[in-house]
Image (cartoon, rainbow, N blue to C red):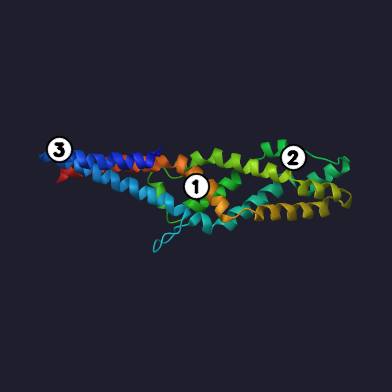
């Protein structure tokens, strides 16, 4: 099934083809609308592609992969500061619990800082100006909820892993401070398993689905500009 971007491209090309069935002003207006719409749609498709892939001679392409380390570090800081603080671990140790279910805590945790780290990386990239023309942060905001949901699921998997629970139980008697360091090492090691390719694939699916409208609106505005330009010629 074709996505919104390619449908927009084909409609634009179709307008160019249909224009040859007319003459005079109508032909020029339809042809200009089609060509400008195609230009706007293809340009925005390229912009989305450049977020994930390096394109030769195009500075700023591949920004998601370039900022991968900062995104992963933001996730680690968020996890440790939200529910693995020394105070929370100490309270847990004193309760003499030998098992813990972190899923409810994770579900209530605000992972917005991780999303904001991604948003900042995108908007500060050379692509930020282009995205800003078509809604900027409000357009990318459509990615927020799907992104946060995937981060929560990944964090829950970390908290429920056998290595995590074994380390938690075996180090309880050593006190909160030592346990906090141990948990930090485990979280860091698990996050280290997230490769740039994994992050790219996860975010690419979200971008492709939700930023498809960026391509559509590029075609729409391009078509309008094409019609207006034909009026001025």
Residue at screen point 46% across, 43% down: 208
Name the image quarter holding the N terminus: top left
Query: On the picture, is 172 further left or further right than 158?
Result: right
Nearer the observer, disc 3 or disc 1?
3
Give x and y (percent) for residue 45. 38, 48
Give x and y (percent) for residue 213. 40, 39
**Which quadrant holds residue 26?**
top left
Task: Name the outermost residue toward the front.
Answer: 1
Residue 22 or 64: which is nearer the viewer? 22
Residue that label 2 marks: 102
* Numbered mark located on residue 79 in the image: none
Residue 211 or 79: which is nearer the viewer? 211
What's the CA distance linking mark 1 and mark 2? 29 Å
Sequence-wise, the earlier of marks 1 and 2 is: 2
Give x and y (percent) for residue 61. 44, 58
Kindly state the secondary structure of the residue where label 1 is placed.
helix
Which class describes the residues within 10 Å of circle 2: few (<14), some (14-19), or many (20+)? some
Residue 84 or 57: which is nearer the viewer? 57
Which class describes the residues within 10 Å of circle 3: few (<14), some (14-19), or many (20+)? few
Residue at screen point 69% across, 40% down: 106
**Which quadrant holds residue 211?**
top left
Query: How many marks on residues?
Result: 3
* Numbered mark located on residue 21 in the image: 3
Give x and y (percent) for residue 217. 35, 40
Say if residue 52 shows up in the picture.
Answer: yes
Sequence-wise, the earlier of marks 3 and 1 is: 3
Residue at screen point 81% across, 50% down: 167
Sequence-wise, the earlier of marks 3 and 2 is: 3
* Numbered mark located on residue 204 in the image: 1
Residue at screen point 24% across, 46% down: 35
């Amino acid at each position: 099934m074709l996505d919104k971007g390619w449908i927009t491209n084909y409609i634009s090309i179709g307008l160019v083809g249909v224009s040859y069935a007319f003459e005079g002003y109508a032909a020029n207006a339809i042809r200009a609308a089609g060509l400008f719409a195609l230009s706007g749609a293809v340009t925005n498709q390229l912009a989305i592609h450049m977020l994930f892939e390096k394109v030769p001679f195009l500075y700023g392409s591949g920004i998601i992969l370039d900022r991968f380390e900062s995104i992963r570090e933001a996730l680690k800081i968020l996890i440790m500061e939200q529910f693995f603080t020394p105070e929370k671990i100490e309270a847990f140790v004193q309760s003499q619990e030998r098992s813990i279910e972190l899923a409810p805590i994770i579900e209530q945790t605000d992972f917005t800082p991780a999303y904001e780290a991604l948003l900042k990386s995108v908007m500060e990239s050379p692509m930020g100006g282009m995205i800003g023309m078509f809604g900027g942060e409000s357009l990318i905001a459509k990615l927020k909820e799907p992104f946060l949901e995937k981060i929560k699921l990944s964090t829950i998997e970390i908290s429920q892993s056998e290595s995590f629970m074994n380390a938690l139980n075996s180090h309880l008697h050593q006190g909160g401070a030592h346990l906090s360091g141990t948990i930090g090492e485990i979280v860091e090691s698990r996050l280290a398993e997230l490769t740039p390719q994994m992050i790219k694939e996860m975010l690419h699916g979200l971008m492709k689905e939700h930023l498809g409208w960026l391509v559509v609106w590029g075609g729409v505005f391009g078509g309008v500009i094409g019609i207006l330009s034909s009026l001025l010629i």
